[in-house]
Amino acid sequence: EAGVTQFPSHSVIEKGQTVTLRCDPISGHDNLYWYRRVMGKEIKFLLHFVKESKQDESGMPNNRFLAERTGGTYSTLKVQPAELEDSGVYFCASSLLQWPSDTQYFGPGTRLTVL
Amino acid sequence: DQQVKQNSPSLSVQEGRISILNCDYTNSMFDYFLWYKKYPAEGPTFLISISSIKDKNEDGRFTVFLNKSAKHLSLHIVPSQPGDSAVYFCAASDVQGGSEKLVFGKGMKLTVNP
């Protein structure tokens, strides 16, 4: 069974540009989560989808971040315009059921560097 | 304000010895805790968990202990192996408004020397 995949693995952009990160969850997983780790800090929750609906987006930093999950399959996270403090590793995770009844499986992450 | 704290950034132990990783939390509403393991360039991988109704959970070489009154948990690895070298994250399950999310600590880098 394929795990959670994320694309790209690395992205380097200039401040003010737009970047779109993609996450493909494990097939059949209705729950999809985005997390972010800024260097040296903890992994922080951004938002949670159940199928195509946003269940919780309380962790989204500001309105420069837009997450979508059309059709309840893959998800995208767009940052527009990017700022220096957006640099970090963005992780996607998926689970079949909601936690703690099921494990969250994480993807390898996308390392975003904003110059 | 950090709700899950891993105060030691790193730990180095000899192969075969015990590794003890500590974690503290501040939110008394947390009732489910997890440890994740992360290798470089990979995502976190679930290792072991514990519910607040228990004080110990064991899975092979890994045991997690929970002290609710002290808001403290620890992960014991025995015997430690070089392949255990990784960053370990302590996390708590936070349930709010019908959604559950993980609240992580900063992580601790474990190095097991052959």
Image: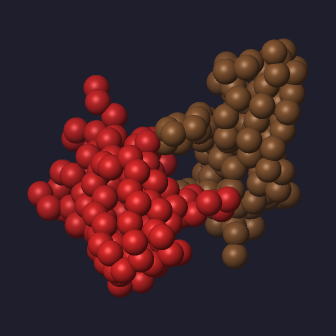
Horizontal side of residue B14 vs B100, given as left or right = right
Q: Colour of chain A?
A: red
Residue A55 placed where, x, y %? 32, 68
Identify the residue shown where x is 82% and y is 22%: B113
Residue A88 placed where, x, y %? 51, 61
Identify the residue shown where x is 28% and y is 26%: A1
Horizontal side of residue B35 vs A55, given as left or right = right
Horizontal side of residue B20 vs A13, given as left or right = right
Instruction: Look at the picture and state if B31 lies above or below B29.
Output: above
Residue B100 placed where, x, y %? 46, 60
Residue B91 placed where, x, y %? 62, 52
Instruction: Look at the picture and state if B102 lies above or below B59.
Output: below
- Image quarter of residue B6: bottom right
Is residue B66 in sight in this rendering? no
Instruction: Look at the picture and state if A67 lies above or below B21.
Output: below
Q: Work out whether residue B1 or residue B70 is closer to the camera in this orientation and state it.
A: B1
Q: Which chain is represented by brown in the image?
A: B
Q: Work out whether residue B92 or residue A13 is closer to the camera in this orientation and state it.
A: A13
